[in-house]
Amino acid sequence: QVQFVESGGGLVQPGGSLRLSCAGTIGNIFRNYVMGWYRQAPGKQLEFVARITGAGVTDYSASVKGRFTISRDNAQNTMYLQMNTLEVEDTAVYYCNRWSQAGPIGSWGQGTQVIVSS
């Protein structure tokens, strides 16, 4: 069963930066997946943040475009989310998963908590 483990969250002040990681335990088929980052803020629904194809083509939600950068290292079965100029509204639990047009697919990990607060 495919599993993903998120890490890198923490407490940061507004305007600060964090880098999240997503490690996939799926061997050499990782490169075949379109991967996505998602987040869920307290009391809100799960929200799409960014996605990246196996070839490195990226797409972002309007709320993070220009501030966040998604990347991946297929050799390491790992995906990243560089988050800059963080805002209080970015506070959420961040998850990674396989992306599809119909929504995220695959098992969910524990996520990593990001808190942006002064």
Image (spheres, rainbow, N blue to C red):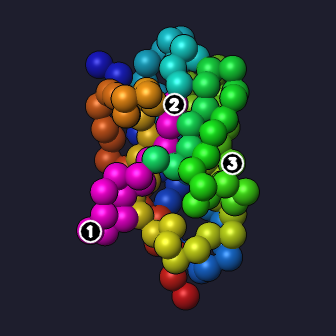
Q: Residue 6 appears in which quarter of the rendering? A: top left
Quarter that holds the N terminus: top left
Q: Mark 2 and mark 1 in contact (Cβ < 8 Å)? A: no
For the question of whether residue 18 can be seen, the reply is yes
Q: Position of residue 53 (x, y in %)?
A: 61, 25
Q: Is residue 112 above or below residue 95?
A: below
* Pointer 3 or 1: first along the chain: 1
Q: Which residue is mark 1?
A: 43
In terms of depth relative to the viewer, which is nearer, 103 or 106? 103
Identity of the residue drawn at 46% across and 47% down: 48
The answer to whether 14 appears left or right of 35 in the picture is right
The answer to whether 30 appears left or right of 76 in the picture is left
For badge 2, the amino acid type reads: Met
* Pointer 2 or 3: first along the chain: 2
Marks 2 and 3 sit apart, C-alpha to C-alpha, by: 13 Å
For numbered disc 2, what is the local secondary structure? Answer: strand
For numbered disc 3, what is the local secondary structure? Answer: strand
Marks 1 and 2 sit apart, C-alpha to C-alpha, by: 25 Å
Quarter that holds the C terminus: bottom right
For badge 3, the amino acid type reads: Thr
Q: Is residue 105 above or below residue 85?
A: above
Q: Which residue is mark 3?
A: 69
Q: Is residue 80 above or below residue 30?
A: below
Q: Position of residue 64 (x, y in %)?
A: 61, 58
Q: Which residue is mark 2?
A: 35
